[in-house]
């Protein structure tokens, strides 16, 4: 049985890609074939072979099943702004139905498919749709990445409340992104008592990317069903 998860964060820059990469590594260790997509990415770099996003390139590298870049990241946008604004600047319309079709064509090639969102839950993708709409169209359970820092309690609780009204929340990950965050453990404990979804792991503050270290701190037991 093929499973998929949509990875969303409380904000931009809180470690969605690192957590997605860690999940890929964790599933690979359990002998699952994996795919990872980042359908929409802004702030892409112009390389010889076209616009490329570093996060999408990392996911390509860590997934077990090979894909071409445009399959991983069909909407590559150059400006480092909200995707609906980056798309507007390039006269592009982000079509979530096309993303869904693209996903359906690919997901049968692996046991586990991870889809990384962009920004936060209500980040606009167009004048009509948000990341939440994309997650709902894909119909995948959501994994919420919470960047543990000052203000994260409010961001996490608001995001979770909005998510659970529209889709299943499979779990959440506490990612310590501020090494100076006061009472980080107490913050995580507070979230555990308020978020009605399993904590999949706590990622300690890392100065540099380490997929193995991230995977070691994730528990995917509750995510694996019907295999």
Image (cartoon, rainbow, N blue to C red):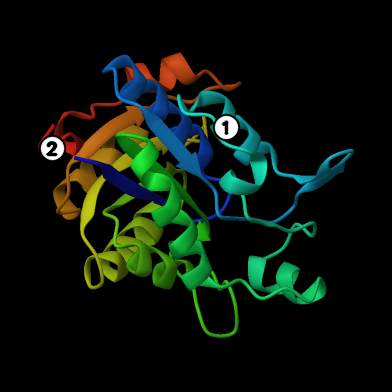
The answer to whether residue 88 is left or right of residue 160 is right
Residue at the image point whose x is 48% and y is 26% from the top: 205
Q: How many marks?
A: 2
Q: Image quadrant of residue 135?
A: bottom left
Residue placed most toward the observer, 119 or 195: 119
Is residue 42 visible to the viewer in this orientation of the structure? yes
Gap between marks 1 and 2 measured at Cα = 24 Å
- In the picture, the quarter occupied by the C terminus is top left
In the displayed orientation, state which residue is furthest to the left.
226
Residue annotated with mark 2: 225
Image quadrant of residue 125?
bottom right
| Mark earlier in primary sequence (1, 2) | 1
Residue to which mark 1 is pinned: 60
Query: In the rendered view, would you say 72 is above or below 28?
Result: below
Residue lying farthest bottom? 128
Quarter of the picture containing the N terminus is top left
Camera-side residue of 217 and 95: 95
């Amino acid at each position: 049985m093929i499973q998929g998860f949509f990875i969303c964060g409380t904000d931009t820059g809180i470690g969605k890609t690192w957590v997605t990469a860690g999940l890929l590594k964790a599933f690979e260790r359990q002998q699952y074939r994996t795919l990872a997509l980042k359908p929409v990415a802004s702030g892409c770099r112009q390389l010889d072979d076209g616009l490329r996003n570093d996060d999408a390139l990392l996911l390509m590298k860590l997934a077990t099943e090979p894909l071409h870049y445009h399959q991983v990241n069909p909407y590559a946008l150059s400006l480092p702004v909200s995707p609906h604004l980056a798309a507007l600047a390039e006269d592009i319309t982000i079509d979530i139905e096309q993303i869904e079709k693209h996903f359906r064509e690919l997901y049968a090639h692996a046991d586990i498919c991870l889809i990384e969102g962009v920004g936060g839950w209500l980040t606009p993708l167009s004048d009509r749709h948000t990341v939440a709409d994309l997650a709902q169209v894909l119909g995948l359970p959501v994994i919420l990445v919470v960047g543990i820092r000052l203000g994260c309690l409010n961001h996490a609780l608001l995001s979770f409340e909005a998510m659970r009204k529209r889709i299943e929340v499979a779990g959440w990950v506490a990612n310590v992104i501020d090494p100076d965050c006061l009472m980080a453990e107490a913050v995580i404990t507070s979230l555990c008592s308020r978020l009605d979804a399993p904590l999949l792991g706590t990622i300690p503050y890392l100065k540099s990317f380490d997929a193995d270290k991230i995977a070691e701190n994730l528990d995917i037991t509750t995510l694996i069903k019907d295999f």
